[in-house]
Image (tube, grey):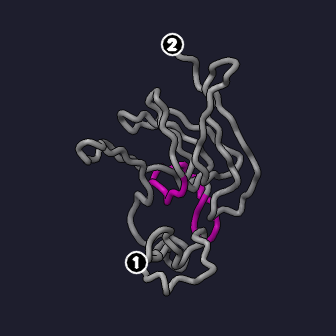
Amino acid sequence: MVPRANVAKDASGIEMGIVPMDGTPFGAMRERFLSPLGIPCQKPPFGTMSAVDLKSGKLVWQVPVGTVEDTGPLGIRMHMPIPIGMPTLGASLSTQSGLLFFAGTQDFYLRAFDTATGKEIWKDRLPVGSQSGPMTYVSPKTGKQYIIINAGGARQSPDRGDYVIAYALPDKK
């Protein structure tokens, strides 16, 4: 925690370093602990998806999320879909049907998890990374539910784009 007086007046909160925490008298140091080669200095997982029972406060499940497929030291892609759990930035979306969608890892995937178990049950490769939260809507004409994701590129990747992609959920049985 950093006193607000020590936070740069023009800090937007989207960059690394000392950033403001809206609604508080503090800022926070937002950095990753990396070697000079850009390799994390702590053991994986670096990012997880977790479910907490809101009544008991107990952790129900926790799974590593994200691979090193589209990242690597010195900006060199590893091309290895090893699920070690990567740093995440983005929101998840939970549906009434028990699905949790998430794309805020450093690889180029939108994933669906079973909310009861945390098991990854589906994923699809995006044209570039996404750090946005998925959205959902139901067509008023057909009643079909869609998941929409914006893919503009992950922060650490040079790949950029301007995509809005929609996926139709299966019809209810």
**Real-space Cα distance between discs 2 and 1?**
50 Å
Could you tell whether 98 is left or right of 70 in the image? left
Residue lying furthest top:
173
Residue lying furthest left:
56
The reply to whether callout 2 and callout 1 are in contact (CB within 8 Å) is: no
Could you tell whether 28 is left or right of 151 in the image? left
Quarter of the image containing the N terminus?
Answer: bottom left
User: Could you say which disc has been placed on residue 1 in the image?
Assistant: 1
Mark 1 neighbour class, 10 Å CA radius: few under 14, some 14 to 19, many 20 or more: few
Residue that appears at 71% across and 46% down? 127
Q: In this view, does 10 lie above or below 155?
A: below
Amino acid of disc 1: Met
Residue that appears at 60% across and 68% down? 14
In depth, the one of 46 and 1 nearer the eye is 1
Residue that appears at 39% across and 39% down? 118
Amino acid of disc 2: Lys
Identify residue for label 2. 173
